[in-house]
């Protein structure tokens, strides 16, 4: 037994490791090397080494004897009576313990839910605000209409596998010095399906499913925003063996607007004012998402001032009412003045101590014109 690896090295722990550290290391290595998970050639051997090491080091008496004698313990097997370790149900049972109790025992003929699908859809700014209905076309897997999903040619029979008797698994038992190991693998005769198809369906080649382009009518509610995700129940890929369809998830991308900006349920826009309007006050017309409204500008309004139009924002997606529209006013400096206008401004500046500005905001007018046209 001189060629056997040190049990502490096998588990990757020190000789002073606590019981909890040993257990934690064992669980991680058992997951890593379990033959039902790891398909490498030496995975099964490594799994056996890990299991053997844990059986010894997790038992206080066996660990004490191992620390004293190592692999030369005269009580071979460390069982006190030489009976060796009993693996019970073998790898399958250990797999069940680690991975939720199902492991490879799942009925291969049980219904299975179809996969979910994701579709990214780009919509206009106002379509996100007010909602829309449209048709989209998606590729998805559907149940074969010819064989109705069983994979067999119509009129032929689907037989239960004579090797695994419909379980989809084969059990291979091995007697070892450490007990009887039962290893469960997918049945080599039926490929784990539990059924034998003598004559395959020519439409789906025996898979029971086909790829199709499916047109789906979708309703986008008012108030969605960029990045919103909508679930369309049952429009994902087809289930297997009578299982339900998966779902379709729509991920929305919203185009930017030339005039309006959005923040949550509120809308923001910027409108220009002349120097005279800002200084003397005025009543101006403002485009909103649905109409044009009047906005009173008080005299002495400063550039950058915000005004709120209550209820002129985006409909709330989950609830009642709407957000607000916030209007920012920007005082625009004129760029083309005649001599008389220039002289008047010089006189005004001289009396008020102000200097003229040459800022250029022509783009604000352009954006506002488009908004008035409903663009």
Image: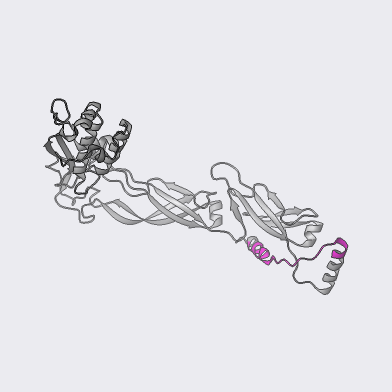
User: Which residue sits furthest front?
Assistant: 68
* Location of the N terminus (image quadrant): top left
Is 150 situated left or right of 126 in this image? Answer: left
Instruction: Tell which of 169 and 307 is nearer to you.
Output: 169
| Callout count | 0
| Magenta span includes 358 | yes
Q: Which residues are magenta?
A: 349-370
Where residue 253 sits: x, y (%)? 49, 55
Q: How is the image coloured?
A: one colour
In the image, residue 30 sits, relative to residue 332, either above or below, namely: above
* Location of the C terminus (image quadrant): bottom right
Is 276 situated left or right of 320 in this image? Answer: right
Instruction: Residue at 31% x, 36% y: name it.
Output: 24
Instruction: Tell which of 270 and 44 is nearer to you.
Output: 44
Where residue 151 sits: x, y (%)? 21, 50
Instruction: Tell which of 299 and 8 is nearer to you.
Output: 8
| Magenta span includes 332 | no
Instruction: Residue at 19% x, 35% y: name it.
Output: 90
Where residue 180 sits: x, y (%)? 14, 34
Instruction: Tell which of 212 and 345 is nearer to you.
Output: 345
Which quarter of the figure has residue 301?
bottom right
Is 256 situated left or right of 309 in this image? Answer: left
Instruction: Residue at 12% x, 38% y: name it.
Output: 174
Asked if residue 110 shows in the view, the reply is no
Asked if residue 249 shows in the view, the reply is yes
Instruction: Residue at 28% x, 54% y: name it.
Output: 210
Where residue 319 sits: x, y (%)? 56, 41
Which quarter of the figure has residue 53?
top left
């Amino acid at each position: 037994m001189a060629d056997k690896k040190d049990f502490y090295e096998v588990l990757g722990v020190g000789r002073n490791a606590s019981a909890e550290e040993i257990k934690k290391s064992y669980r991680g290595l058992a997951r890593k090397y379990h033959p039902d998970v790891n398909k490498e050639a030496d995975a099964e051997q490594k799994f056996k080494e890990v299991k053997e090491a844990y059986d010894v080091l997790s038992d206080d008496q066996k660990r004490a004897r191992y620390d004293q004698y190592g692999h030369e313990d005269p009580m071979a097997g460390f069982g006190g009576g030489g009976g060796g370790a009993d693996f019970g149900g073998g790898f399958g049972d250990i797999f069940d313990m680690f991975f939720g109790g199902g492991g490879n025992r799942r009925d291969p003929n049980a219904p299975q839910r179809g996969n979910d699908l994701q579709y990214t859809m780009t919509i206009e700014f106002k379509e996100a605000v007010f909602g829309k209905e449209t048709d989209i076309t998606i590729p998805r897997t559907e149940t074969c209409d010819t064989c109705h999903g069983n994979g067999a040619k119509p009129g032929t029979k689907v037989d239960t596998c004579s090797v695994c008797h419909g379980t989809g698994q084969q059990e291979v038992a091995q007697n070892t010095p450490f007990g009887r190991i039962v290893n469960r693998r997918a049945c080599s005769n039926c490929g784990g399906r539990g059924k034998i198809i003598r004559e395959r369906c020519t439409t789906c080649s025996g898979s029971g499913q086909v790829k199709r382009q499916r047109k789906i009518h979708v309703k986008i509610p008012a108030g969605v925003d960029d990045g919103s995700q909508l679930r369309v129940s049952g429009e994902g890929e087809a289930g297997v063996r009578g299982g339900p369809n998966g779902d379709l998830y729509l991920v929305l991308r919203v185009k930017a607007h030339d005039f309006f900006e959005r923040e949550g349920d509120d809308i923001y826009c910027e409108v220009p004012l002349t120097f005279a309007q800002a200084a003397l006050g005025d009543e101006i017309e403002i485009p909103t998402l649905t109409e044009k409204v009047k906005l009173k500008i008080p005299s002495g309004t400063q550039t950058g001032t915000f005004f709120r139009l209550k209820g002129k924002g985006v409909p709330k997606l989950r609830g009642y009412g709407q957000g607000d529209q916030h209007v920012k006013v920007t005082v625009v400096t004129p760029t083309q003045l005649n001599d008389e206008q220039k002289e008047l401004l010089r006189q005004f500046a001289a009396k008020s101590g102000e200097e003229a500005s040459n800022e250029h905001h022509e783009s604000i007018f352009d954006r506002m014109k488009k908004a008035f046209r409903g663009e």
